[in-house]
Amino acid sequence: MIVTNKLKLPMAFVKAVSTEKHNKEGEFSATTLLKGCKDIILTDRHWDEIEVDAADRVWALFGSTLHKILEEFDDGNFHEEKFTLKVENSVITGTIDSYDMVNGVVYDWKTASIWKTKFKDFKDWHRQGLTYAWLLRKNGLEVNKCRFVALLKDHSKSKARTDEEYPISPVITYEFDVMDEEVEQLEKELLEKIPILEAYYKLPDDEIPPCTKEERWADDDKYAVMKKGVKKAVKVCDSEDEANALAEESGPNFYVEHRPAISRKCLDYCDCKQFCNFYKNMIKGE
């Protein structure tokens, strides 16, 4: 990965945010497997060509620092232990931040935005925790609960005082009991994904199917009923048929405006997008 320094930051900062490849050849970590196959393969395939700026990796530095500090303190748990399991021709890995063997609890340290709590969007953490639980159980260790402890990097004390739904503390905990049925379903999905991933590795970049809508953080397409001369939509519909019917019912001055789904990860959070034909076609269509 090429790390640029557009703001001419100190070299110590640039070196600190520079990173090596996350996975060894043939290995896929629990966090990597949260991504779409196209994202995984293009990032791996073009790692030495991907360009990011040091200033844009500041939050990655916060996360690394958090892990480094917490792993230094002895609390009787195992810290930074790596577990592996071979699936097909690949190896699934998971490095556990902290594991309480006595109570069967997996801990994971996070830095997050306040939006994580505002939208209660913990699906990725949940799946990551289930993958850890699956790996540990396959290695003969019990897991009863996963607990994610997150520092909110943009927490505001003033908003916490005035908004009842705002987190009181800059530290939040997301936890869940590990259910056998969920682990079995997770295993089924992983055993299906790995052969597909291996098969896609044999394809050229542009022939790899795009990431799913969920993996791209994409909304659904919307259809806005508009009135000529008015900027604000009369109504925004999920269905094109519903929008067309309303526009026709409303009269000749009304029309339907198609608002394509926005893939938020592609736009702002995908390192390999410059090599992705889906992203390039999406930008052309804007």
Image (spheres, rainbow, N blue to C red):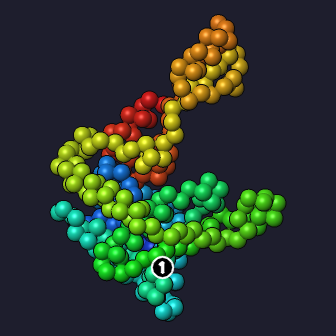
> Where's residue 23, x and y in %?
30, 67
- Label count reads 1
Q: Amino acid at mark 1?
A: Val
Please rate how many residues cluster around mark 1, counting C-alpha atoms within 10 Å: few if below 14, some from 14 to 19, many from 20: many
> Is residue 150 among the parts visible in the rendering?
no
Determine the residue located farthest toward the front in the rendered image: 181
Q: Quadrant of residue 26?
A: bottom left
Seen from the viewer's position, the closer of residues 52 and 221 is: 221
Q: Name the residue carrying label 1.
A: 105
Measuring 56% from the left and 56% from the top, which residue is drawn there?
121
Badge 1 marks a residue whose secondary structure is strand
Instruction: Name the residue: 58% across, 20% down.
Output: 243
Return the x and y of residue 44 as percentages of the image width and height. 28, 58
Placement of 206 over or under 35, stated as above or below: above
Which quarter of the figure is the N terminus placed in?
bottom left
Left or right: 66 as drawn, with respect to 226: left
Q: Quadrant of residue 279?
A: top left
Spot the residue most to the right: 162
Q: Does the image show residue 188?
A: yes
Name the residue: 32% across, 46% down: 275
Residue at (39, 44) in percent of width and height: 212
Give how far across and how far down residue 8 sits, in percent: 51, 63
